[in-house]
Image (cartoon, rainbow, N blue to C red):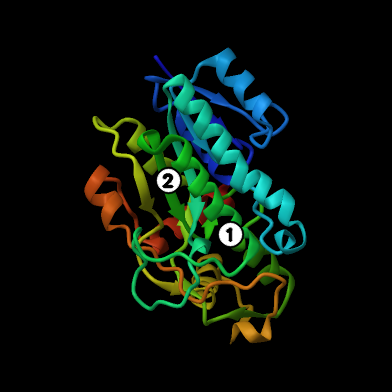
Amino acid sequence: MKKVLVTGSGGQLGRELQRLAEAYPAFEFLFTTRDQLAIDQPGSVQEYFETHRPDWCINCAAYTAVDKAESDKDAAFRINGDGPGFLAKACRTSGARFIHISTDYVFDGSRSTPLKEEDPTGPINVYGASKLEGERQALQQHRGGTLIIRTSWVYSEFGSNFVKTMIRLMNERPSIAVVDDQIGSPTYAADLANAILHILSARKFLPGIYHYSNAGQVSWYQFALAIRFLIHSTCQIKPIPSSSYPTPARRPAWSLLDKTLIRDSYGVPIPGWDRSLALCINRLQVN
């Protein structure tokens, strides 16, 4: 039985992987939080790998406070940059395969066509730069055994995310404003988790960089409208430009990822964003 280490298992993606794990009895999953395995501490990583000898490592651990990263650069680069490098090195040493989760924020958002894996990167905030450094270190340490998945706008029933924030605000306020000039596609963490487990079960391992998000194109404002429709809210939503909602970290205006490569290489399902949003909200309402 293959052992699969999942770091950062308390986050949105880690929680979804835990929920799906029982459907994959061919794998023994080792779910860890930062308290159990701090990926930015090389001694801790080496000791864990020597003790447990995983065959796969799925790195869901990350510094995800995008705005805070602007003033906390060292921590962001330590966790998002060095951490993946330490894990990739441990994987290489022990003969394990490494799946690392990255982000659309490695791009500058200046394009207007779906972003391909080989398109030039150019992060415009510290978080994106730290994640790009993580990609570089992982590939440098274990190029032949590393698979990187860049994703965007992740949400789920777990943790803090745009969908849950919008539902709360729509229940609290008569009106809200949402930016309408940032374009991308949301990613339901359950779909991303399913894609990762699909890759784990594939006959061939094809390392490299891949893009994954749900299918379709939407702005944050349009995403909010869809949420309002599904929860039957009467809250008024006003579209605004990003300039009217300044944040410490700049966000890319264009984050739409091209999913052709991961679909053709692994045959992973890529549901439409609207269908997946409805599933997530239904689960939130049931729970």
The residue drawn where x is 47% and y is 62% is: 186
Q: Where residue 194 sits: x, y (%)?
A: 40, 41
Mark 2 = which residue? 148
Q: Judge from the rendering whether residue 280 lies leftward or rightward of residue 130; answer left or right.
A: left
Q: Where residue 81 sits: x, y (%)?
A: 60, 47
Residue 80, above or below 238 = above
Q: Residues within 10 Å of mark 1 (few under 14, many from 20)?
A: many
The residue drawn where x is 40% and y is 28% is: 23
The residue drawn where x is 51% and y is 16% is: 53
Mark 1 = which residue? 129
Q: CA distance from mark 2 to mark 1?
A: 15 Å
Q: Secondary structure at mark 2?
A: strand
Q: Where residue 154 sits: x, y (%)?
A: 53, 56
Q: Mark 2 near mark 1, Cβ–Cβ under 8 Å?
A: no
Q: Secondary structure at mark 1?
A: helix
**Residue type beneath disc 1:** Ala
Ranked by sequence position, the earlier of labels 2 and 1 is 1
Q: Where residue 283 sits: x, y (%)?
A: 53, 49
Q: Judge from the rendering whether residue 203 lies leftward or rightward of residue 85; answer left or right.
A: left
Q: Residues within 10 Å of mark 2 (few under 14, many from 20)?
A: many
Q: Which mark is residue 87?
A: none
Residue 189, above or below 278 = above
Of marks 2 and 1, the one in the foreground? 1
Q: Judge from the rendering whether residue 210 lies leftward or rightward of residue 100; answer left or right.
A: left
Residue 148, above or below 97 = below
Residue 129, above or below 209 = below
Question: Quick one: 62 or 130, which is closer to the camera?
Answer: 130
The residue drawn where x is 34% and y is 55% is: 271
Q: Judge from the rendering whether residue 199 lies leftward or rightward of residue 253; answer left or right.
A: left
Q: Locate the C terminus and report the quarter of the image it occupies.
A: top right
